[in-house]
Image (cartoon, rainbow, N blue to C red):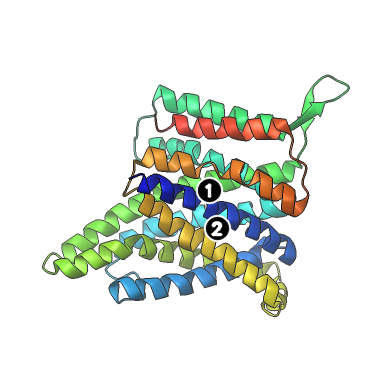
Amino acid sequence: MFLGELISIAVCVCWSASALFGQVAARGIGHAMPLNVLRMALSLILLSLSMTWVCGVPYPAYADGETWMWLTLSGLMGYVLGDFCLFNAYIVIGARFGQLFMTLAPPAAALSGWILLGERMSPMALLGMTITVCGISMSILGKKGEDNHRHLQLPLKGILYGIGAGVGQGVGLVLSKLGIEHYEECIKTTLADDPTQMSDMLDAMPMSATFIRAITGIICFSIAMFYVHQQGTLVKSLKQGRLMFIILLATITGPFVGVSLSLKATLYTSTGIAQTIMACTPILVLWPSHVLFKQKVTLREVVGAIISVIGVAMFFI
């Protein structure tokens, strides 16, 4: 009973931990590009091992060209744009504000679903979008100045990175849905005569989809890293055992365990309940950020984060 809700809470804890580890790693390296190359590489290793254990194949078997196309596009939006912006946001504005902007993912997914899939946007979804944006605005606006207007308490660059992270995650989710649905049809068609293998492949399908997205990420991040001459930073990072351990923890708690549990949660409870609980990450990360990084947390920021999560919940009512 309530297994799905409990798993969703575990996901929220994992993503909060991933955000905190990610902030330490991002500021330790100083550049998002080498960090994302390392994360993608570790993700591919962990995913390959998991797929081999589940279905005996260390790669996305039976994925055709269209599956690769949609999941590659998803990787470009979710990993390349989204993660690049997210980890730069960690460097500039920290994990608590970086995760706050991730509440923009549901509105971005709703808009892109409307554009790409023709999905209807209900009045409640539009209201939720407005409430989410208002909650974020409340958190990032500081005290009134001499002109009696509130001014941004965060660097504009950090805000833009945060918006890019949330939008990239939301659009990437819709593209991923298209790819996974097509991949499922490929598996069912190809393995119609082998129900046992079909079941194993379907169980491993989320990991296979994430594998394709991670391949896209590591290729793009590697090219960009060499273009801006940051490969030396990556080599230095590999020699720092503590830093690599933190990156490994960020990878395990985020794209590996966190994503896997999030998919599992939807099997035991409704998607709306699961997504709403998981969206509480910006609230959960406030106290650890205060304790670990000595960051002052104001009542306005807490209320703004709560309002943003309420806005996310409106999408699933």
Q: Compared to 266, does 147 lie above or below?
A: above
Kindly identify the residue that appears in the image at 53 percent across and 72 percent down: 41
Q: Position of residue 45 (x, y in %)?
A: 47, 74
Kindly identify the residue that appears in the image at 66 percent across and 34 percent down: 302
Q: Position of residue 98 (x, y in %)?
A: 64, 47
Residue underneath mark 2: 80
Report the quarter where the N terminus lies.
top left
Q: Position of residue 135 (x, y in %)?
A: 61, 30
Measure the C-alpha gap from mark 2 to mark 1. 8 Å
Q: In the rendered structure, which amino acid carries the disc numbered 2?
A: Val
Q: Position of residue 245 (x, y in %)?
A: 63, 72
Residue underneath mark 1: 168
Q: Compared to 45, does 261 lie above or below?
A: above
Report the quarter where the C terminus lies.
top left
Q: Residue furthest front?
A: 1
The number of discs equals: 2
Q: Compared to 194, does 165 lie above or below?
A: above
**Depth check, front residue: 174 or 279:** 279
Say whether residue 117 is left or right of residue 187.
right
**Is residue 268 in view?**
yes
Q: In the rendered structure, which amino acid carries the disc numbered 1?
A: Gly
Kindly identify the residue that appears in the image at 62 percent across and 67 percent down: 247
